[in-house]
Image: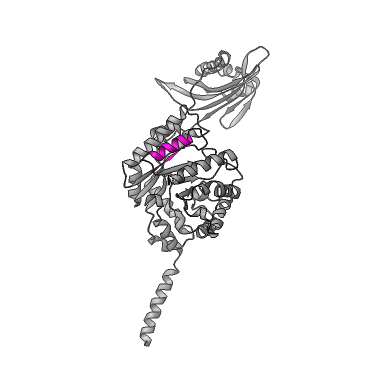
């Protein structure tokens, strides 16, 4: 090779070296985006109502109701002295961001207040011979419309004269939900987001488990769970080349096995979604673990894939919970794909999530057969606010488990721009381009 040839090769090598030493963010500009969202949600009209549920108004005993009606009447007439007289001598009232104690202070705090057609309605109460509380809402009536302005909490005490007076009162304004909060999100909207973000397909997780959440009061619960699952299946079926549907339910409810059997028999469902946090599952409760073992065993027999939000409400969640899941639950589903959402957390990445994920990393390193069909979605795991130490922690676990086991997922997004943003967040992790390309191109077995 002559001198000029050697110089040419040296120039080529120098250019190549320079290109691989570019800052990571610049190099990732050319990285292809993901092709599948492995964890998406639609929002039915029923779910939109559930997320903004209000306790129904109730009737109070006459002696308590009289206090609320007198409050309304004196408010409308701007009789602040009469309003203050509804309180006990040492009564307390919240006014703005401060507390006022005693009738004189309450009277002064109320000067200028009132005049509107205030309405108070109770939604729960308790009382005994001398003490009571009322919680509810308040608003103003204008023409035929009753606004919902805020929440009230009254503590009442019966005086020696037998009259109930207010011992403490809190009235807090609420921010009304935005149109986006109460709007539905059908399959057509999700497909439009996918198109805008350059993505091909999505796995749609039913929100039916929300109707079994302990923090919601739902009548005829199982019928609503079935209806929500069926709505999700119908929506996904509108775009059979783009969407697959996962049914869901609270696994510790009595109807869980009946609904699982119904879903597995339906051609509209590809798999099952379980959400341990919302369902208040306790992985340290043997009864809960036994129910989950049966569910995983039953799903495995039909090769019915499972997506599981494994993080529980336990404040000490971590390694112990992951060990129980791996040993007692995952072992029951060796033949069907199991996808753990949010990398075994619930969004973000803290020490407790890392402790849980470490258990699986060790199992993969040991060639544990229980991990043969195990995958993790990365929805909500990465964010720009994370310090470098956390980003490095995430990448270490990804590499220990294997990038081919990592699935891109979004969970919930309000816009196509937010969909693209989630990929940009993932690109902030110190992963190599080849690793990012692998994650972007990974497709879960149930989507193939």
Q: Residue at x 38, y 87 (%)?
A: 3
The correct choice, above or below, for 261 with respect to 68 in the image is below
Stretch of the chain drawn in magenta: 245-265
Q: Position of residue 261 (x, y in %)?
A: 43, 37
The answer to which of 315 and 171 lies nearer the viewer is 315
Q: Residue at x 43, y 59 (%)?
A: 436
Q: Is residue 369 shown to the viewer in this render?
A: yes
The answer to which of 251 and 404 lies nearer the viewer is 251
Q: Residue at x 53, y 57 (%)?
A: 364
The correct choice, above or below, for 131 with respect to 350 in the image is above
**Left-right relation of 63 to 116:** right
The answer to which of 316 and 390 lies nearer the viewer is 316
Q: Residue at x 48, y 33 (%)?
A: 255
Residue reaching furthest to the right: 160
Q: Is residue 374 magenta?
A: no
Q: Position of residue 247 (x, y in %)?
A: 42, 40
Q: Is residue 26 shown to the viewer in this render?
A: no
Residue reaching furthest to the bottom: 2
The correct choice, above or below, for 158 with respect to 40 in the image is above
Residue reaching furthest to the top: 161
Q: Is residue 256 magenta?
A: yes
Q: Position of residue 374 (x, y in %)?
A: 48, 52
- Where, quadrant-wise, is the N terminus in this rendering? bottom left
Q: Position of residue 87 (x, y in %)?
A: 61, 19
Q: State the scheme by which the image is colored.
A: one colour
């Amino acid at each position: 090779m002559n001198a000029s040839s050697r110089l040419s090769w040296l120039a080529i090598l120098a250019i190549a070296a320079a290109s691989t030493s570019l800052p990571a963010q610049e190099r990732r500009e050319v990285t292809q985006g993901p092709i599948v969202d492995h964890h998406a949600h639609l929002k039915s009209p029923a779910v939109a109502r559930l997320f903004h549920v209000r306790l129904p108004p109730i009737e109070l005993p006459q002696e308590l109701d009289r206090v609320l009606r007198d409050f309304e009447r004196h408010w409308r007439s701007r009789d602040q002295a009469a309003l203050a007289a509804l309180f006990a001598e040492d009564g307390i009232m919240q006014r703005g961001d401060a507390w006022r104690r005693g009738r004189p202070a309450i009277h002064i705090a109320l000067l200028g207040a009132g005049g509107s057609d205030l309405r108070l309605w109770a939604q729960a109460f308790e009382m005994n011979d001398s003490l009571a509380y009322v919680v509810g809402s308040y608003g103003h009536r204008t023409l035929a419309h009753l606004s919902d302005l805020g929440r009230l909490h009254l503590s009442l005490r019966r005086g020696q004269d037998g009259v109930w007076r207010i011992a403490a009162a809190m009235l807090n304004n609420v921010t009304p939900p935005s149109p986006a909060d109460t709007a539905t999100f059908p399959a057509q909207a999700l497909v439009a987001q996918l198109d805008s973000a350059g993505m091909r397909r999505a796995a749609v997780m039913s929100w039916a488990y929300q109707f079994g959440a302990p923090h919601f009061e739902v009548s005829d619960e199982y019928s609503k769970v079935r209806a929500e699952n069926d709505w999700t299946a119908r929506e996904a079926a509108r775009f059979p080349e783009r969407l697959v549907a996962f049914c869901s339910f609270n696994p510790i409810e009595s109807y869980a096995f009946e609904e699982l059997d119904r879903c597995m028999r339906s051609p509209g469902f590809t798999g099952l979604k379980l959400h341990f946090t919302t369902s208040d599952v306790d992985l340290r409760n043997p009864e809960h673990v036994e129910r989950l073992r049966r569910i995983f065993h039953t799903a495995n027999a039909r090769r019915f894939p499972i997506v599981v939000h494994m993080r529980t409400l336990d404040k000490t969640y971590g390694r112990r919970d992951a060990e129980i899941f791996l040993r007692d639950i995952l072992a029951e589903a060796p033949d069907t794909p199991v996808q753990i959402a949010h990398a075994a957390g619930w969004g973000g990445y803290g020490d407790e999530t890392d402790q849980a994920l470490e258990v699986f990393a060790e199992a993969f390193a040991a060639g544990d057969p229980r991990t043969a069909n195990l995958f993790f979605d990365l929805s909500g795991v990465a964010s720009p606010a994370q310090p470098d130490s956390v980003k490095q922690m995430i990448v270490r676990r990804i590499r220990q488990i294997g990038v081919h086991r990592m699935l891109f997922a979004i969970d919930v997004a309000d816009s196509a721009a937010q969909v693209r943003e989630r990929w940009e967040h993932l690109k902030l992790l110190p992963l190599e381009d080849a690793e990012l390309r692998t994650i972007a191109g990974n497709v879960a077995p149930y989507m193939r």
